[in-house]
Image: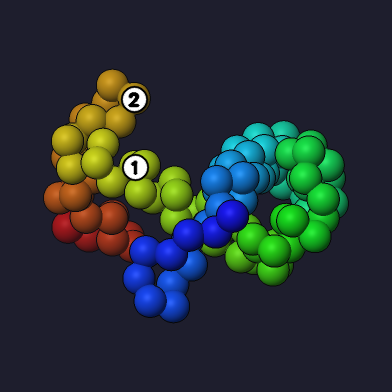
């Protein structure tokens, strides 16, 4: 059963949302293990049909783009707080890359 929150806009069914989360979680793990992992292997590991995976992500690029966006959204609050895995990151915001030849 699908529901709507505004005229013409359909929310994902609960199982579709769950499938999407499972695909993203599995893809993150599989691609960490093997950067060349196929979408077929990701769909099998996630326990969804290829059609389901392609319904959410029409291409490998689309899947990886969502993973990158998700990683950025997870990282941003930690960056703003100045901490990521126990290491302050404020210095990265103000540090300039070195110039060629060691010029200041």
Residue 83 in the image: x percent, y percent? Answer: 23, 30
Q: From where the camera sits, is residue 7 visible?
A: yes
Position of 96 compared to 29: left or right? left
Residue at the far front in the pictured view: 1
View extreme (top): residue? 86
Residue 92 in the image: state x and y as whole percent.
23, 45
The residue where tag 2 is placed is 85
Report whether 81 appears left or right of 68: left
- The residue identified by callout 1 is 75
Specify the quadrant of the image occupied by residue 42: top right
Q: How many angstroms separate mark 1 from mark 2 (CA)?
A: 10 Å
Give me the residue at 64% from left, 60% from top: 56
Task: Tell me which numbered mark, 1 or 2, is placed earlier along the sequence.
Answer: 1
The tally of labels here is 2
Query: In front: 30, or 92?
Result: 30
How would you rate the neighbour count of disc 2 (Cα within 10 Å): few for under 14, some for 14-19, many for 20 or more? Answer: few
Residue 97 disc label = none
At horizontal 26% and vertical 36% (from top left) the residue drawn is 78
Look at the image and tell me in which quarter the C terminus lies: bottom left
Q: Nearer the viewer, residue 49 or 100?
A: 49
Q: Nearer the viewer, mark 1 or mark 2?
A: 1
Establish if 31 lies above or below 2: above
Image location (x, y in percent) of residue 96: 22, 55
């Amino acid at each position: 059963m699908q529901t709507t929150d505004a005229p013409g806009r359909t929310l994902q069914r609960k199982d579709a949302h769950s499938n999407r989360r499972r695909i993203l979680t599995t893809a993150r793990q599989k691609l960490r293990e093997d950067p060349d992992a196929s979408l077929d292997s990701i769909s099998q590991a996630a326990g969804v049909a290829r059609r389901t995976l392609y319904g959410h992500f029409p291409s490998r690029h689309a899947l990886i783009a969502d993973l990158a966006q998700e990683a950025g959204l997870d990282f941003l609050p930690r960056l703003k707080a100045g901490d990521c895995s126990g290491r302050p990151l404020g210095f990265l915001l103000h540090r300039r890359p070195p110039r060629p030849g060691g010029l200041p």
